[in-house]
Amino acid sequence: MGASMCTAYVASLPDAKLDWDAGSVAVGEIADPSAFGWDSFELETQDEFLDDDGDIPEGPTFEMTDLATLKKYGRRVLTELKDALDTPDVTLLTIGGYWIYLTGGLDNDAGGDDEYGAIYASGGLPDLVMKAVGFVLKPEDPPSRRSGAQGDATDTDIVDAIALGLGTKPDWSGADELTWIANAIAKVRRHPGDTDPVEYYEDFTGRTGFDPLDDDFLSRYVGEVAAEDDDQDDGEVG
């Protein structure tokens, strides 16, 4: 049987205090066996553990395994994950406002007791359990505006800043290059050239639920026309 080198990771916010006891408590509160996401192959690789009470069939499948056994395995996975993250074989990266715990291994060893297997197996734990420990479930959606300080901006802040910088200005210089940037931004934000500057600013504020002029980082990118219009609106309301 062939094998491929794969990566496995979990993510948290920087300096997050991982609470493994809270994760264990959360495992105990799971009432539905289907909340656990391991397949039959992953369970089969844990034959020795699952059979330690002598009442689990050989070659167990998800359907054969009762809730109590899944919880027991879940706590073991948490323990192995905690141990794995403390080893030099797991690399800690800071990407997009996250701490990424990353390692690699062979896909046919995904159920083994190495660091890759431990992180891979944690993917079968319910979301409730991973959240209780302190992990972020979808690091592909980085949090924005964690800080207004320039050095702490996330990649989402940068995208917002470029979008605001283009979308709230009435005229562009270097049109070809800015059009290229705007078209790239349009894949993840509203296209900055689709509306007039004030309308872009109002749309951005309405969609995100906050005023970028109140943010130390983003406010410097909002065009003067949009900012002046916002000031006028404030005066009218007052």
Image (spheres, grey):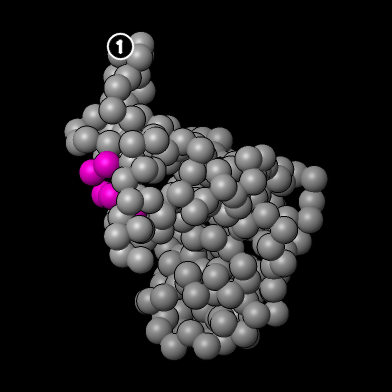
**Front position in the image: 35 or 179:** 179
Image side of residue 182 versus residue 62, left or right: left
Image side of residue 91 versus residue 161, left or right: right
Residue 145 % position (x, y): 52, 51
Q: Is 231 located above or below residue 237 in the figure?
A: above
**Front position in the image: 35 or 127:** 127
Q: Quadrant of the C terminus?
A: bottom left
Secondary element type, mark 1: helix
Q: Is residue 201 magenta?
A: yes
Q: Quadrant of residue 188?
A: top left
Q: Residue drawn at (46%, 49%), measured in percent from left and top?
A: 213
Q: Main secondary structure of the magenta part?
A: helix
Q: Is 146 located above or below residue 69 in the figure?
A: above
Q: Residue drawn at (47%, 70%), measured in percent from left and top?
A: 127
Q: In this rendering, does residue 38 appear at all?
A: yes
Q: In this rendering, does residue 59 appear at all?
A: no
Q: Quadrant of residue 63?
A: bottom left
Label 1 crowding class (10 Å Cα cut-off): few <14, some 14-19, many 20+? few
Q: Is residue 94 magenta?
A: no
Residue 210 % position (x, y): 40, 58
Residue 175 % position (x, y): 30, 13
Magenta extent? 198-205
Name which residue type carries label 1. Answer: Asp
Residue behind mark 1: 176
